[in-house]
Amino acid sequence: MLGLTTGMAQAKEIKGERYVPTIWVDPDGCEHWVMDDGWEGYMTPHVTRDGIPVCRRGNTCGVMAADQLFTTDQSYITPAGQARLQEFFRSATATAFVIVGHTDSRASDAYNMGLSQRRATSVAKVARSVGANVVDVRGYGERAPIAPNTTAAGMAKNRRVEILCIR
């Protein structure tokens, strides 16, 4: 018994980072989780015969031109934009939403990532103010253009906030 007690007294305490389990929903509607040991998985109990997860249906149900919601280089939503968004979220039949912000390529990548995230967060705040369930907010900056950034019209199309509805 003495040897066991002595061995325990010599054991070292190892301290690490505080871990917070994470759950998120991808735009495809799949809920993912990750645990402290690095394992990741799907939260859905429904799978096909091949073991592929069957996720909730998600689709882009709204695309708002950033120029109509925000003034240049800002993330504050205009009062008219707030009213328009509130009406959209009140009438939407989705169970949850993913809000995704985008920019054109005129500024640096790092700046655009921050601006698109701030704008998406502003839209999510409006959504939550009317009781909408926002499960994820993302900013992609200039990384997912839908038009070339070589013309004013193309850049205007790229400045947008997409709302993905999960049913």
Image: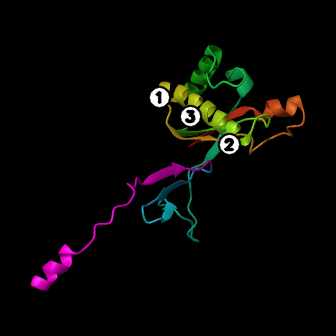
- 35 inside magenta stretch: no
Within-10-Å neighbours for mark 3: few <14, some 14–19, many 20+: few
- Circles 3 and 2 in contact, beta carbons < 8 Å: no
Task: Indicate the amino acid at tag 2.
Answer: Tyr
Whichever of callouts 1 and 3 sits on the residue coming sooner in the sequence is: 3
Task: Name the image quarter holding the N terminus.
Answer: bottom left
Q: Quick check: 156 left or right of 89?
A: right
Measure the C-alpha gap from mark 2 to mark 1.
25 Å
Residue 63 position within the rendered picture, expressed as x and y whole percent measured from the top left = 70, 33
Residue 53 position within the rendered picture, expressed as x and y whole percent measured from the top left = 56, 62
Task: Indicate the amino acid at tag 1.
Answer: Gly
The residue that mark 2 highlights is 140
Q: Quick check: 47 left or right of 164?
A: left
Question: Tag 1, which secondary structure?
Answer: loop
Front-most of residues 9 and 52? 9
Residue 70 visible to the viewer: yes
Residue 7 position within the rendered picture, expressed as x and y whole percent measured from the top left = 19, 80
Question: Tag 2, which secondary structure?
Answer: loop
Q: Quick check: 24 left or right of 115?
A: left
Measure the C-alpha gap from mark 3 to mark 2.
26 Å
The residue that mark 3 highlights is 93
Front-most of residues 102 and 53? 102
Question: Magenta residues, as a range?
Answer: 1-27
Within-10-Å neighbours for mark 2: few <14, some 14–19, many 20+: some
Task: Indicate the amino acid at tag 3.
Answer: Thr
The residue that mark 1 highlights is 131
